Image: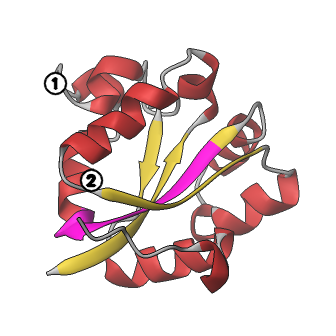
Amino acid sequence: MLERTLSIVKPDAVRRGATGEILQRFESAGLSIIALKKLRMSEELARGFYAVHRERPFYGDLVKFMCSGPVVVSVLQGAEAIAKNRALMGPTDSTQAPPGTIRGDFGTDIEQNAVHGSDGPETARAEIAYFFNASEILAPCEA
């Protein structure tokens, strides 16, 4: 099934210059990048995006980390895009992520884990709308 999902290359991976390789992994896996922007999250933007975690003990540190440098936000589209992206990323805790996954290769721990990806269709729709309006999302080119 054709799906869309949100991906964020987090500040730690952007700082290390891993953005290009991470985006290349998405495309090599058959995902089309149909929207892309680089931005620096304000505290307000980060708090809103991660509001679902507001009551969790790591919320404040997560917001601070996500505001610590630029991020690259994209919309990925492809067959089973959500599951495919989650497999590419690997487990949330980079110390548990195998080599060859994005988090295994570029993350350092559970917080600085290089990337974020939507966890389901409803989440993907809400997260994509949080960062992109409809005119910023392009249909992939037909070959």
Occupied quadrant, residue 102: top left
- First-in-chain label (1 vs 2): 2
Secondary structure type for disc 2: helix
Please state which of residues 68 and 34 is positioned toward the viewer in this rendering. 34
Residue 118 point in image, percent of width and height: 40, 64
Q: Amino acid at mark 2?
A: Asn
| Residue in view at x 19 percent, y 62 percent | 83
Read off the residue under disc 2.
85
Q: Quadrant of the N terminus?
A: bottom left
Region in magenta = 72-82
* Res 91 visible: no
Q: Residue at x 25, y 52 (%)?
A: 86
SS type, badge 1 = loop
Q: Main secondary structure of the magenta part?
A: strand
Q: Which residue is mark 1?
A: 98
Which label belongs to residue 33? Answer: none
Q: Amino acid at mark 1?
A: Pro
Against 34, residue 74 (above or below) is above
Q: Tag 2: Cα neighbours inside 10 Å, few (<14), some, or many (≥20)?
A: many
Gap between marks 1 and 2 measured at Cα: 15 Å
User: What residue is at 27 percent from the left and 77 percent from the top?
Assistant: 3
**Contact (Cβ within 8 Å) of mark 1 with mark 2:** no
In this rendering, position of residue 39 left or right of residue 56 = right
Q: Position of residue 50 (x, y in %)?
A: 63, 62
User: In screen coordinates, is 80 left or right of 71?
Assistant: left
Q: From the image, which quarter does the C terminus lie in?
A: bottom left
Q: Of tags 1 and 2, which is closer to the observer?
A: 2
